[in-house]
Image (spheres, grey):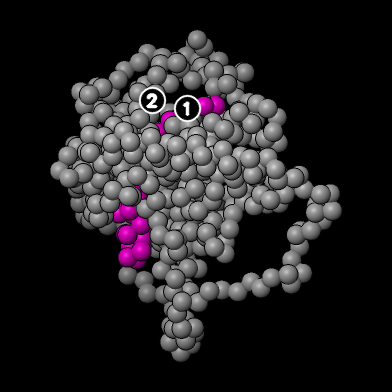
Amino acid sequence: MSQPLTREQHLDLYYYMKLNRMLDEQLVRLFRQNVVVGGLYSNLGQEATSVGTAYALEKRDWIAPMIRNVGGLLVKGYKPRDILMQYMARVDSPTMGKDGTSHFGDIKVRHVVSPISMLGDLVPVMAGVAIGGRYLGQNIVAMTWVGDGATSTGAFHEGMNFAATQHAPLVLVVENNQWAYSTPVAKQVPIHDLADRAKAYGIASAIVDGNDVMAVYQTTKEAVNRCRAGKGPVLIESKTMRMKGHAQHDAAEYVPKEMFKYWEARDPIARYEKYLTENKIWDEKTKKELDARIDKELKEDLEFAEKSPLPPPELAEQGVYCDGCHTVEAVWNRSKAEVTPPKSSVKPEWEVTDFGGFDLASTMAKQSAAAGENGGKDARIISQGTHKNTAHKPQQRPNGGAAKSAQHPARNFERQQPASQKFKGQKSPSQRMMDQKTNGQPEKSSAVARVPFGRGPKGKEGRK
């Protein structure tokens, strides 16, 4: 378990989430004024995931954000003006106006790797960063985010397998925001919990209520501590909701209105405000002061961004190639002698302890143990004298998912008592909100997800 947060840290979480929300709204206004020159991807409703996960890291740790992780950038030290100028393609932006969207980073000071548009590709990249940091003795943890759709890409699986076999100190946050553009999760994967993908790699996993910033922070902090202790990578599934379309051009008409209402009642900022009030962490005066501070910063940074000029034409040919303009060298935090011969010498041979043969007794014992854990479901029929290995067909589940509750409190990595649901002996905001709204049971809706613009099958279930 992580240490309880101080009052200042609690207020930090609110500050970053509210700043994230207000900056997002400001960018939407600029987009409609044609001031934003590229695409704009709202992170409305996902602030708790970005802020809570990034806040669990230390300054030395590395992140690779995606398009909806502006909150993580703010936690890492970027100012609103940096992000405003980036989307406005101004010369004082992090990319000097050469990119009009989220492709920027800082590997020297903030330890931020630029986003990669190809989904899932950041997983192997950050696995390499994590392994490189370990080799250099930096004792860092690397973190990146993917959406539910990216978990279906080849790069995701290759990266996770590589990270697992190398025991890389990598925290992968899967933001299950229910939609991969216009495809609902149940139409792209046959499982209910994306965290179950971690079982294929033999790594730890956790599921957390992505709209409960305290649960997100505490679960991630435990994962970060686990990685730093050398116990290998961790996959965290954050269950949340994308409250806007894929981008500003997408009206998200395919999302059932009842689904938006369901998640509006679970707004992460409103829930955290209630949490701070109920636990007497702040008062109305403190809230007004924080809100006024955010308004002032955004106003000043917008004025700064608007005064920044567009890049001159001659800048286009600069910075394309490095001709010795700066030194690229590793930052060693350990003696090189530790990783060079003779200290690093090993015998050029593998130690094989399992010959991989079929052992009926041990296989049946494992299957019996597994059947006992899941109540006998999905038991497999195994035969030693035949090449067949058949399985009972799993029971059909509605919507392609398991018959589980729609609400998933944070779970620790051994699937025991939730590790991040209590504060001073009280229920978390997530649990209390669930009790108040649904008495602990998921809300049911007969709403049907619509398939837009001729995408996908056009059966009766796809029409509305």
Quarter holding residue 134: bottom left
Residue 26 pos. (x, y %): 57, 33
Dot 2 crowding, Cα within 10 Å, few <14, some 14–19, many 20+: some
- As for residue 19 lying within the magenta part, the answer is no
Q: Are marks 1 and 2 in contact (CB under 8 Å)?
A: yes
Residue 327 versus residue 24 in the image, above or below: below
The image position of residue 192, as x and y in percent, is 36, 33
Rendered image: mark on residue 243: 1
Residue at image position (25%, 55%) is 3
* Badge 2 element: helix
How far, Cα to Cα, is label 1 from label 2? Answer: 8 Å
Give the quadrant of the N terminus: bottom left
Q: Residue at x 48, y 59 (%)?
A: 62
Q: Residue at x 65, y 43 (%)?
A: 305
Is residue 367 in view?
A: no
Q: In terms of depth relative to the viewer, which is nearer, 242 or 417?
A: 242
Residue 446 percent location from the top left of the image: 37, 13
**Where on the picture, by quarter, is residue 375?**
top left
Residue furthest bottom in the image: 342
Residue 240 lies in the magenta-colored region: yes
At x 58%, y 58%, the residue is 106
Q: Amino acid at mark 2?
A: Trp
User: Does dot 1 land on a helix, a strand or a loop?
Assistant: loop
182 relative to 70, above or below:
above
Residue 437: x %, y % from top left = 26, 22
Query: What is the magenta range?
Result: 217-245
In this view of the protein, can residue 444 be seen by the observer? yes
Question: What's under tag 1, amino acid-wise?
Answer: Met
Which residue is identified by label 2? Answer: 263
